[in-house]
Amino acid sequence: MSKIGIFFGTDTGSTRLVAKNIFKQLGEELADKPKNINRTSAAELLQYDALILGAPSYGMGELPGLTTGCLEPNWQEFVPYLDGADLSGKRVALFGLGNQERYADRFASSMIHLYRLFYGYGAGIIGCWSTDGYKFEHSHAVIDNQFVGLVLDQRTQPHLTDERIKIWLAQIIPQLLPVMARVA
Ligand SMILES: Cc1cc2nc3c(=O)[nH]c(=O)nc-3n(C[C@H](O)[C@H](O)[C@H](O)COP(=O)(O)O)c2cc1C
């Protein structure tokens, strides 16, 4: 597929809005409309070689899903469908939502599970993001002093979201274009 696939999980709608914002900033030429992961088949996701995947954090930093109190299926219910998939050659950029004031001890932690999962299946993970500008104690989603993807806080820093997305997309688009061109 010669476009970027955007998939998200959400419980209260914020991650959907952020996914739509990302889509709007990318434009229809580069990306397909974002899709809720609870209405996505594995085949649908795997048709893309360039992926942007988003997740909110719930529970104690697990993947969001029914066991973390989400009302609808989320990433937790989707990931078993990927079992055994070969994602080599694909590039994946991650974004995660959280609340750094209320959940400072496990800020935006769920993103680490998508990182490990997709990396484990052979995908190249791109789009790490500086922790500068956030105030938190701990996040499982930090490796080598950087978040493994873009982190957004719609509760305490919504005014920074547009600009953060803009900067992040400028960073990842050049890394996504080559894998899209391969199949165009
Ligand atoms: C019950 C509950 C648990 C949460 N747990 C975390 C958490 O562990 N870490 C974090 O950073 N944010 C946590 N949050 C904040 C959400 O991740 C944040 O509000 C996010 O924007 C929600 O996204 P959604 O509207 O797409 O579901 C929690 C929120 C609720 C209501």
Image (spheres, grey):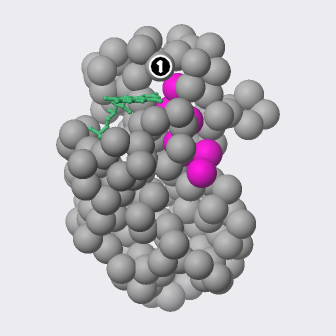
Horizontal side of residue 139 vs 162, given as left or right? right
Asked whether residue 4 appears in the rendered view, the answer is no
Kindly identify the residue that appears in the image at 53 percent across and 44 percent down: 62
Name the residue tied to disc 1. Answer: 103
Relative image position of residue 127 (x, y in whole percent): 58, 47
Q: Where the N terminus falls, by quadrant? A: bottom left
User: In the picture shown, does residue 51 fall above or below 46?
Assistant: above
Q: Residue 28's quadrant in the figure?
A: bottom left
| Ligand 1 sits in quadrant | top left
Q: In the image, is residue 29 part of the stretch drawn in magenta?
A: no
* 90 up-or-down from 124: above or below: below
Label 1 sits on a secondary structure element that is: loop
Give the class, few, some or many, for how many residues have Cα within 10 Å of label 1's Cα (few <14, many ≥20).
some
Cβ of disc 1 within 8 Å of ligand 1? yes
With 35 as the anchor, is 114 left or right in this view?
right
Q: Position of residue 6 (x, y in %)?
A: 36, 62
Residue 136 image point, x, y percent: 56, 14
Nearer-the-camera pick, 13 or 24:
13
Residue lying furthest right: 144
Q: Residue at x 62, y 28 (%)?
A: 139
Is residue 78 shown left or right of residue 175? left
Q: Give the extent of the magenta segment.
A: 107-113
Nearest the viewer among 23 and 121 is 121
> Does the stretch in magenta take in 111?
yes
Q: Tell me how many marks there are.
A: 1
Q: Give the amino acid type for the residue marked by disc 1 in the picture.
A: Tyr
